[in-house]
Image (cartoon, rainbow, N blue to C red):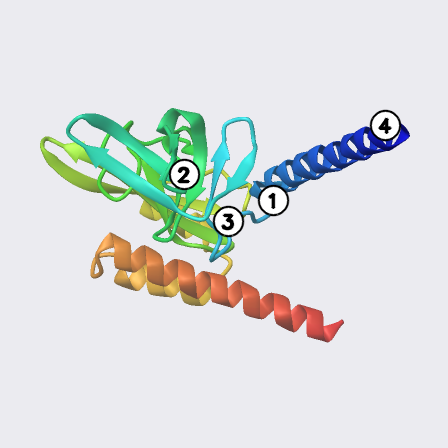
Amino acid sequence: MKKIKSLLLLSAVLLTVILLASWSNKENLLNANTIEETKPQETAGKIFVKYKNGTVVSFQSLKLVKGLFSSPHLLADGKVKINPSEILAYQNEQHYAISQTLLADGRKSAVSIETLPGFAIRLVNGRLNIYCKKYLNGNLPVDEYFVQLGFDGKIQKYSPELMKSIIKDDEQALGFFSEKLNVLENISLLQSTASMYNKSILLNQTIALSDK
């Protein structure tokens, strides 16, 4: 009888250990997938989505799905469906993109070519960020550009006047932009100017630190 009681007690202990281990593994998996939001969250190599409640969740893969019989959405890890209305931003292997709800102005769009409908792709990342969103002009998709100064800066619709006001503290970037304004296409002009501006700012910060 004592032997049976001992076996039952041992079985109960083993079952408790197994259940606790299983619960711990699930908690660790959840914590591994959920990332605390930091600045900047969007870094090369990471695949994630940022939900409207501020939660950022990482995945192994994130694919844009389009088709005749389904509305455009993201498919995470081959099984989790994510609708555009659920999120503010995402990053996959191709790009980092933000919802048009984060844009200060511009046309509302439902075009889905490279990204989710109404989302803008970031072309340049740095102190000065450049975004591009597509909208329909008749039946043709047209690029619309946006600029943002700083990580928390307002994302505004591009205009030459706005761009000049943003880069006015960098004579080289401002001179290049003004000289090439009517020569280069917008995408080349904005990417080149922003890259030049960001490198100049980084260089100045490095020099300032070395002088301390």
Residue depicted at x 45% and y 48%: 60
Dot 2 or dot 1, earlier in sequence? 1
Q: Which residue is mark 1?
A: 32
Classify 11 as above or below 189: above
Give the residue furthest to the front: 1
Residues under numbered marks 2 and 1 in contact, where contact means CB atoms less than 8 Å apart = no
Numbered marks: total: 4
| Residue at image mark 3 | 42
Query: What is the crowding at mark 3: few (fewer than 14 residues within 10 Å), some, or many (at least 20)?
Result: many
- Label 2: which residue? 98
Q: Earlier in the sequence, mark 4 or mark 2?
A: 4
Q: Distance from label 2 to label 1 (Cα)?
A: 23 Å
Q: Residues within 10 Å of mark 4 (few under 14, many from 20)?
A: few
Callout 1: SS: helix
Q: Quadrant of the C terminus?
A: bottom right
Q: Which residue is mark 4?
A: 5
Query: Which x, y percent locates residue 133?
Result: 29, 40
On screen, residue 186 above or below 112: below
Kindly identify the amino acid type of the residue bearing the numbered disc 1.
Answer: Ala
Between discs 3 and 1, the one toward the N terminus: 1
Q: Amino acid at mark 4?
A: Lys
